[in-house]
Image (cartoon, coloured by chain):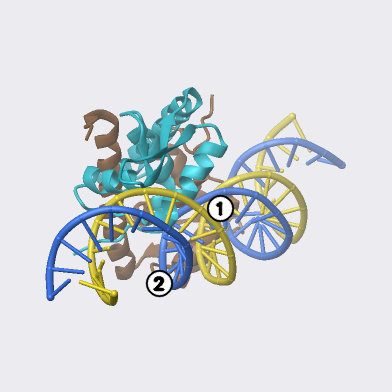
Chain colours: A brown, B cyan, C yellow, D blue
DNA sequence: GTCCTATACCTTACACTGCAAGGTACATGG
DNA sequence: CCATGTACCTTGCAGTGTAAGGTATAGGAC
């Protein structure tokens, strides 16, 4: 029943998806994984081995800022928040995505032959 | 004025885009490049160094079938047509794309916080 | 003649990315 | 005890676009 999405699509959507989720406030890796599943109605399920490197890259590039926290259950978590630079990147990613999406929808439905 | 799309997005859209263009009938590399530009209203501009390997992969995987032709101007062209297997792949790619797009739009506009 | 542009195809070195698989650690419940 | 859930991390592999280069023909400008 699960339709695994091809990996290039995961690669293309990971950054905008994470940045976008963080516009709703701070979050951490494990929770982001659940959010992605929720947002997609269960259709998308990211692996943690893919997400953590993404978060590290985003932090390295200054698009998000992380801070460690210790829950009362004694678990450590790394919370991330969106930076101003991250907001700018999100806007660009969204524009790029929509440009490509528009062209795809055009080629699917609009079926204009030349 | 040109907004280059990040490469992961190109990678994610290349296969469905090419397959989709070929649903309109046979085409060849150089023409596909112009079609992509046209379909996107000039926003997308693929490099040929990226497209030709894509076409070779699609042919290797049996999603398209190619045949060489010689124009009356003495130019050689390799025409590609969509195979049945390619149609199936296109349908899956489209479903995957829309699932991801839906999740992204959800995270952008729907802004549901949990 | 020479040069530039357009057409039309191809390849290689490089950096990047997800995937699969493995690891660490603690809490809870059977 | 041991399985599950939480919560983080890393490595080797295969696949991908980019940038840059190559080959070749046709047509127009100068």
Q: Position of residue B49 (x, y in %)?
A: 43, 57
Q: How many marks?
A: 2
Residue A66 visible in this rendered orientation of the protein:
no
Q: Nearer the viewer, residue B31 or A59?
A: B31
The residue at the point 33 percent across, 43 percent down is B32
The residue tagged 2 is A62
Q: Residues within 10 Å of mark 2 (few under 14, many from 20)?
A: some
- At 44% from the left and 26% from the top, the residue drawn is B87
Q: Which residue is mark 1?
A: A50
Q: Which quarter of the rendered picture does the N terminus of chain B lie within?
A: bottom left
Give the image location of residue B76, x and y in percent: 40, 45
- The residues bearing labels 2 and 1 have C-alpha atoms spaced at a distance of 19 Å
**Residue drawn where x is 47% and y is 35% of the image:** B66
Q: Secondary structure at mark 2?
A: loop
Q: Which chain is disc 1 placed on? A: A
Q: Quadrant of residue B6?
A: bottom left
């Amino acid at each position: 029943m699960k339709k695994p999405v091809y990996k290039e699509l995961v690669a293309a959507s990971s950054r905008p998806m994470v940045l976008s989720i963080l516009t709703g406030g701070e979050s951490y890796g494990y929770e982001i994984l659940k959010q992605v599943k929720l947002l997609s109605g269960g259709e998308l399920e990211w692996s943690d081995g893919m997400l953590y490197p993404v978060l590290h890259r985003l932090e390295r590039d200054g698009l998000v800022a992380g801070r460690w926290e210790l829950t009362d259950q004694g678990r450590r978590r790394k919370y991330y928040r969106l930076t101003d630079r991250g907001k700018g990147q999100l806007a660009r990613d969204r524009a790029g995505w929509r440009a490509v999406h528009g062209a795809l929808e055009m080629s699917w439905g609009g079926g204009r032959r030349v």
